[in-house]
Amino acid sequence: MPPRTARILCLFAALLCAGGCALLSSGQALSEREAVVTRVIDGDTIEVSPPVRGEEDVRLIGVDAPELHAPGGPQPYARRAAAFAERRLEGRRVRLEFGPELEDRYGRVLAYVYTGGEMFNRLLLEKGYAQLALFPPNTRYAGSLRQAQREAREARRGLWGLPPDELCRLADRGNGIGGGC
């Protein structure tokens, strides 16, 4: 391929990514894909088949559910969040929508997960199974996710109904909870 053509293709791919697409290692743009959830790891992490870019683990964008596999044992509400995700996702076909950043620092694919036309990431916040955790540049639905958390918090739904001594054991994601007791 001539150098000029390669530069033009790279520029085109960069423009696509700026608009919300991720790139496959081949340079092909990837914005969404269907998969089957083969396993729920915890409330905000699943395994899918077929893998995305060779990776089965998918971390849900914009949410942080209590850790099921935390040092010292599960965090408060972690078992409930994982059970909710299992009931709603395990064995089901889902649509994965990718943001500009395709992987987190652990190599997991980052995605918004849809089942039956509903964004599961938002549902976790709405039901109080997770707290908001935004990491630019994957902030496309920040307003909608913030609203879902606000409603759950005001209604003291899910983890928002936990006593302060349990809330402090969650991760600090800038939502006024977590960070240690």
Image: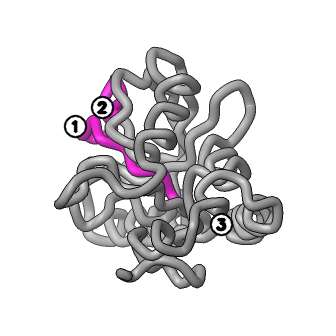
Q: What x and y, as percent, mark residue 37? A: 42, 25
Q: In the depicted view, which residue is nearer to us: 119 or 77?
A: 77
Whether residue 61 is situated above or below residue 18 in the rendered picture = above
Q: Which residues are magenta?
A: 47-61
Give the secondary structure at mark 1: loop
Q: What x and y, as percent, mark residue 47? A: 33, 33
Q: Circles 1 and 2: CB distance less than 8 Å? A: yes
Which residue is identified by label 2? 51
Which residue is identified by label 3? 140
In the image, what residue occupies the spot 53% across and 68% down?
138
Residue type, numbered disc 1: Gly
Does the magenta segment cover residue 101?
no
In the image, what residue occupies the spot 71% across and 25% down?
116
Give the secondary structure at mark 3: loop
Q: Circles 3 and 1: CB distance less than 8 Å? A: no
Q: What x and y, as percent, mark residue 27? A: 33, 53
Q: Which label is found at residue 54?
A: 1
Neighbor class of circle 2 (other Cα within 10 Å; few <14, some 14-19, many 20+) is some
Tell me how many marks there are: 3
Neighbor class of circle 1 (other Cα within 10 Å; few <14, some 14-19, many 20+) is few
Of the 4 image quadrants, the one containing the C terminus is bottom left
Q: CA distance from mark 1 to mark 2?
A: 5 Å
Q: In the depicted view, which residue is nearer to us: 53 or 165?
A: 165
Q: Which badge, 3 or 1, is on the more N-terminal residue?
A: 1
Q: Which badge, 3 or 2, is on the more N-terminal residue?
A: 2
Q: Horizontal placement of 113 versus 76: left or right?
A: right
Q: Which label is found at residue 26?
A: none
Q: CA distance from mark 3 to mark 2?
A: 23 Å
Residue type, numbered disc 2: Pro
Q: In the depicted view, which residue is nearer to us: 17 or 139?
A: 139
Q: What x and y, as percent, mark residue 142? A: 68, 70
Residue type, numbered disc 3: Arg
